[in-house]
Amino acid sequence: MNMRQTLHIFGKDVRYLWREICLVLALDAMFAWIETHSPDPWWAEMLLTAAAGYLVARLIHAEAIPGDRQFWITRPYRWKSLLGAKLLFVLVFVNLPILIAQLLILMVNGFSPVSNLPGLLWSQVLMIIVVSIPIAALAAVTSGIVAFIFPALILLAIGFGSLEMIWFLHLRQVLEWPVQVGWVRDSVAVVLLVATALSVLYIQYRKRGTLLSRSLALGGAALGVAVYVYMPWSLAFAVQSRLSKQSFDGSSLQIGLDPNVMKFLPRPMLKHVEVDLSIAVSRVPDGVDLEADALAVSFQGANGRTWKSGGYDLSTPNTNSRGRGVIIVHGAGLMDLSFFNEERAKPLNVQGSLYLTVFGNPRSRTVLLRETPTNVMDGLQCYTDIFGEVLCRSALRWPGLVVDVKVGGTDTKSFTRFISYSPFPADMHFNPIETGRALVSTQSSREVTFIAKEPLAHFRLDFQVRGVKLAEFAAAAK
């Protein structure tokens, strides 16, 4: 790559796109101001995203790749210098202003920029590989801004339309995953997206093979969607278990399905059966804090017909009660009505897997909360709203901790039922501050105790019950 030529192209693009640059910089400034003064600044993020995408597309189209009559083809441009100039432009006029805006937002809200620098940089990496590079790849296979906007709108329509169709057809399990391991599926999708986009950019700038690039883009998009939809979350939990901070031997634990609590409620009008299951985990050692992450169950008949719980059914169990050495986990889901009607009187084999996490290293702190944010622990700032409810906020992502709160003699409440086990220091959001709310009031006392514990080990327990007849546990149809 000829650096002198790269800087020459960069300077030419700056002069050519100075109006668009001013627009993006103005929106960056407005975004930073609104984020520190407005409780719901989503529209500023949408405007900034659209403007940044438009700038990237205009940048690529300054030397459009498709076709053979462009003036720039006659110039002695090296493809590495041309591509390098485009990437430098994106870093300087798209990502750097957003990084500065996020730094200002954190500083205004009392967060340390130095301690959050790894998360800030990772957030920018995500924006480059998930937003800027795919937009540049799409622009590279189109000849102008009109040709770019049309497929972009089609992709957006397909994306939002697919989401609506999934919900309309009651196929929520396609997208609903246990939030704890959703980062695994997202990471796989990002890797495929980036690999496809970089391949398209390489082919376009190295060989100008537009037909091949478009075919590759379509194939990569189809593969990414297929992986995202059909990747089982059991695989994600297997990945998560390998990333455990500590090892835990669950062989001494006993797990079983409690038939006294099992219930099936047919709803013919809705064409499904509500399933309620209760799982008991016993012989839990003293001092071990277990939480259920997900539950997968299958019912199999003698003829081989099987119903399996999907990504939504039973995947978010409740830990109902605890005793000495015992936890009771409750799961609910929807069973196919036709399977229930055909197999209800026949003995079935029930197989299941319960995914569990061991939490530990608890720490607590009691503070006197006001409406002004107070540093509590682990980067959390907590305060009360005008109604006395407790809120906490953190920089770049919610920390990988379960945070409980207790006011006086009230029951302990959590800010979030489930947390992400992602090992990465930030999520991809323009707004660098994430806020959580606990359903507890400080009307009686402003002295609040915060308890935090971290996930240490992830493992799975399997169970099996033979000869279960659904009819014996069926309630009257509604």
Image (cartoon, rainbow, N blue to C red):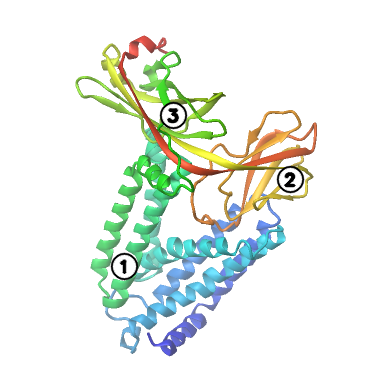
The residue identified by callout 2 is 383
Q: Quadrant of residue 264?
A: top left
Q: Position of residue 387 (x, y in %)?
A: 75, 37
* Image quarter of the N terminus: bottom left
> Which residue shows up at 40% across the image and 48% down it?
242
Q: Name the mark nearer the viewer: 2 or 3.
A: 3
Determine the CA span between mark 3 and mark 1: 51 Å
Q: Is residue 31 left or right of residue 328?
A: right
> Which residue shows up at 34% across the image and 63% down it?
195
- State the count of labels: 3
Label 1 environment density (alpha carbons within 10 Å; few <14, some 14–19, many ≥20) = many
**Element at label 3:** loop
Please tell me which of labels 3 and 1 falls first in the chain: 1
The residue identified by callout 3 is 253
Closest to the observer: 451 or 411? 451
Tag 3: amino acid: Leu
Q: Position of residue 234 (x, y in %)?
A: 36, 40
The residue identified by callout 1 is 200
Q: Position of residue 163 (x, y in %)?
A: 41, 43
Closest to the observer: 446 or 15? 446
Tag 2: amino acid: Tyr
Q: Are marks 2 and 3 in contact (CB under 8 Å)?
A: no
